């Protein structure tokens, strides 16, 4: 069993209380389906971020910034990607990137 980071990009912010509740219900239902595979449900990211470059410069993140993360446990990258297929952000125009985490320390 390995850890995998799901990195979310895009998706929309619900504008009404009803839409926010529906979005939270969808995430809660998906996490419930994942059960013990969820190691850390994660959180959304703030809308602004900084990009630090090797030359020492700092700028705003542009383009398609990451919007949040979750951490799952799965047997393989393919298994983690299969679990990610049910992510609610995919129904809202967002994307999910799946990365395996390996112990370095």
Image (cartoon, rainbow, N blue to C red):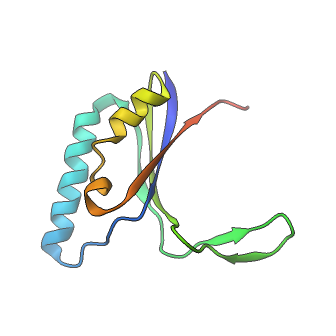
Relative to 14, say whether 67 is above or below: above
In depth, the one of 93 and 103 nearer the eye is 93
In depth, the one of 78 and 43 nearer the eye is 78
Residue 15 on image: x %, y %: 23, 78
Residue 8 on image: x %, y %: 44, 55
Relative to 80, say whether 69 is above or below: below
Q: Quadrant of residue 95?
A: bottom left
- Say which residue appears at 41% left-offset and 65% top-offset: 10
- Say which residue appears at 23% left-offset and 36% top-offset: 33
In depth, the one of 30 and 89 nearer the eye is 89
Relative to 49, say whether 42 is above or below: above
In depth, the one of 64 and 22 nearer the eye is 64
Total marks placed: 0
The answer to whether residue 38 of the structure is visible from this angle is: no
Q: Is residue 55 left or right of residue 38?
A: right
Residue 104 on image: x %, y %: 72, 32
Residue 84 on image: x %, y %: 36, 41
- Say which residue appears at 25% left-offset and 56% top-offset: 91
């Amino acid at each position: 069993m390995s850890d995998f980071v799901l990195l979310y990009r895009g998706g929309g912010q619900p504008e009404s209380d009803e839409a926010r509740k529906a979005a939270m219900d969808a995430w809660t239902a998906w996490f419930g389906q994942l059960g013990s595979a969820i190691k850390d449900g994660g959180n959304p990211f703030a809308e602004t971020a900084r990009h630090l470059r090797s030359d020492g410069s700092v700028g705003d993140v542009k383009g398609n910034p990451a919007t949040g993360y979750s951490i799952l446990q799965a047997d393989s990258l393919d298994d983690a990607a299969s679990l990610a297929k049910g992510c609610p952000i995919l129904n809202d125009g967002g994307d999910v990137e799946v990365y395996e985490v390996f112990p370095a320390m």
